[in-house]
Image: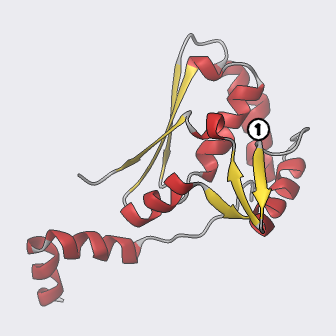
Amino acid sequence: MSQLQDKVLRDRDFFIEFLDDLSINVTEMFRDPAFYKALREKIIPKLKTYTYSKIWHAGCFNRRRGLFTCNTFTRRRTADRCQVYATDFSRKVLDIAKEGIYQKSEIEQYEKNYELSGGKRSYPIYKSRYGSVIFDKELSEKLYLQTTIL
């Protein structure tokens, strides 16, 4: 342990790699439909009363939560009054997030969860090809990704 500690403290590249290994890179969008329903029905209407809002998703993994937030505000015509940030300490994860390409099978499960959370229309606009999905560029551009490590 002391050798590991020494290497983590003195070797920046090793430190970054070590953090990536500690990162848990799994998620399922809308896995708690009751939470997202409450967010949609109770929180977002209150945020709409503000002239400007900033929303931060810490530990974004691959930006799906941030895309949901951008999509929700876009549909409620308040996207121009909010800024959504998504951060993670894993640079590898953020590199994947910047590509914005997901497996279609994952998105299909998210859409089912989205409906359970009270969503009325299909989950964010995306294009599907060859078993993969890429989100609408305009929606993706509303989400700012950043690492939490300098």
What sort of colour scheme is used for the picture? secondary structure
Observer-nearest of 67 and 134:
134
Q: Residues within 10 Å of mark 1 (few under 14, many from 20)?
A: few
Residue 60 seen in the current view? no
Q: Nearer the viewer, residue 49 or 101?
A: 101
- The answer to whether 82 is drawn above or below residue 6 in the figure is above
- Residue 51, image x and y in percent? 56, 10
On screen, residue 14 versus residue 71, left or right, reads left
- Image position, residue 114 (x, y; %): 83, 49
Q: Is residue 108 depicted above or below 138 in this figure? A: below
Residue depicted at x 77% and y 61%: 129
Q: Quadrant of residue 28?
A: bottom right
Image quadrant in which you'd find residue 110: bottom right
Q: Quadrant of the N terminus?
A: bottom left
List the residue tagged with mark 1.
38
Residue at point 28%, 54% (across, down): 149
Q: Is residue 74 above or below residue 59?
A: above
Residue 65 location (% of width, % of height)? 62, 48
- Residue at disc 1, secondary structure: helix
Residue 133 position within the rendered picture, expressed as x and y whole percent measured from the top left: 73, 58
Front residue (pair 86, 50): 86
Instruction: Indicate the amino acid at tag 1.
Output: Ala
Q: Is residue 2 above or below residue 77?
A: below
Q: Quadrant of residue 95?
A: bottom left
